[in-house]
Amino acid sequence: MGVPHGPCADPQHEDDSRQLRVRRLGAGPDRPGRHARAARRLLQEGEAVTPEQRIEELGLTLPAPVTPLASYVPTARTGDLVYTSGQVPMLEGKLHQTGKLGVDLGVDEGRAQARICVLNALAALKAEVGELSRVRRIVKVVVFVASAPDFIEQPQVANGASDLLAEVFGEQGKHARSAVGVAALPLDAPVEVELIAEVA
């Protein structure tokens, strides 16, 4: 699943500076801001913008790939397709939040965790192909959501992943998707994301 060992973060005990840093890494609510507007402006002006530049313009940081801790690899390529292993919302070696949607986290928090998962998946993808500009299309995304028995808003949580991919890759970021509610995820992660990309 691609996660390192480390203590699970308790969001109730994060200090203000930590929360600010996390929001800049993409864990905040999905609201278009000045970074998103700047990215759109570059596109409208006809300048060539790489996916890495779009990520930066969104005020986000592409992390280093997470090292696997079990018997699997972060990515597997067959022909023009790259499959990523599942990624959970790791920041600086530990989970940003833990728990279940509908009990410990709300939809907005879950959406933010999905965005962090996507950044980790893109880091693994970049390590495989060298540059994200080699991505022709995001083909399929699967979002697993640790859910309370009565929680049914998995698609809204998964939108955090889908919307970020569309912001980074434009039309090439639009994809088929599954949003799956599960009883639990490894390390008590709230969300896990895996994706399939077509590459050059």
Image (cartoon, rainbow, N blue to C red):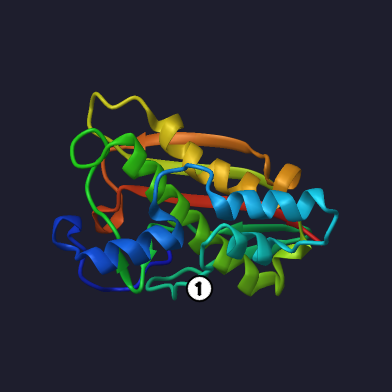
Query: Which residue corresponds to mark 1?
Result: 65
**Along the line of sight, the residue nearer the viewer: 183 or 15:** 15
Residue projecting furthest to the right: 46
Query: Measured from the top left, where is residue 37 in percent x and y?
Result: 63, 49
Q: Decide if residue 78 is in sight here.
A: yes
Residue located 56% across and 42% down the image? 162
Query: Measured from the top left, where is residue 168 in percent x and y?
Result: 65, 53
Residue located 39% across and 54% down the image? 27
**Along the line of sight, the residue nearer the viewer: 85 or 22:** 22
Residue located 71% across and 70% down the image? 129
Tell me: residue 138, above or below residue 25.
above
Query: Measured from the top left, where is residue 19 in percent x and y?
Result: 29, 61
Residue 123 is drawn in which quadrant? bottom right
Secondary structure under the numbered disc 1 in the rendered image: loop
Judge the density around disc 1: few (<14), some (14-19), many (≥20) Cα neighbours within 10 Å.
some
- Name the amino acid type tagged 1: Pro
Q: Total of numbered circles in the picture?
A: 1
**Along the line of sight, the residue nearer the viewer: 168 or 66:** 168
